[in-house]
Image (spheres, rainbow, N blue to C red):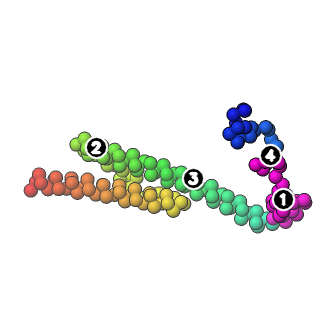
Amino acid sequence: MAGQKEAGMDPIGGMTGATAAGGTPRRPAAGGFRVPEAAPPPAAVATPAVLLDGLLALQEAGDTGAADRRARQRGRDLLAALAALQRDLLAGIAPRLEGLAALAAELPAAADPALRAVLAALVLRARVELARVELARVELARSRHG
C-alpha cells in the first residue's frame, strides 16, 4: 500500500462520499439532482373502459408473441428442409420434397415485420428450389423419351 501512495493513488477506505483530488469531500453543485420532498399526487382512478382497453392490448400482445414463436419455428423447419434438400442433391439421391412443399405452401403469420420479411424470403427460396427440382425432373424425363 505504501507504493500506491507514492504513485499518486489513494487506497480505497470504504464507503465515504466522493472526494476531490486533495482528499476533501465534494459538495453537490447548486441546482444539482434533488429528491422531491413530497410524493406527487396519485393518478386518477382509471375508468373501466380504460382498463378494458389495457387488458385487450395485453392480450393482443400475448397473441402476437405466440404467433411470432410459431412463425420462427416454421422458419427453422423451412431451413432444415432446405438443408435436407441440399444434402440430397449433393449426395445424388432423389430429394424428398413433400415436407418442403408443405412448409412452402403458405406464408406463416408473424407480427414482427422483420420476421415476416425473413419468412417471405425463406418461402420464396423454398418455392424456387421446388421449381428447379421439378424442372430438372421434366428435362430428365424429356431427354429419356426424346
Please identify the quadrant where the N terminus is shown: top right
Give the secondary structure at mark 3: helix
Q: Which residue type carries mark 2? A: Asp
Q: Which residue is mark 2?
A: 88
Tell me the crowding category of disc 3: few under 14, some 14 to 19, or many 20 or more residues within 10 angstroms, Cα based: some
* Mark with earlier residue (1, 3): 1
Of badges 4 and 2, nearer the viewer stands 4
The Cα atoms of the two marked residues, 4 and 3, are separated by 57 Å
Q: Are marks 4 and 3 in contact (CB under 8 Å)?
A: no
Q: Position of residue 44 (x, y in %)?
A: 85, 66
Of badges 1 and 4, nearer the viewer stands 4
The Cα atoms of the two marked residues, 4 and 2, are separated by 74 Å
Reply above or below: 50 against 27. below
The disc at residue 23 is 4
Front residue (pair 63, 38): 38
Q: Which residue is mark 3?
A: 66
Q: Is residue 122 left or right of residue 141?
A: right
- x 71%, y 65%: residue: 53
The Cα atoms of the two marked residues, 1 and 3, are separated by 44 Å
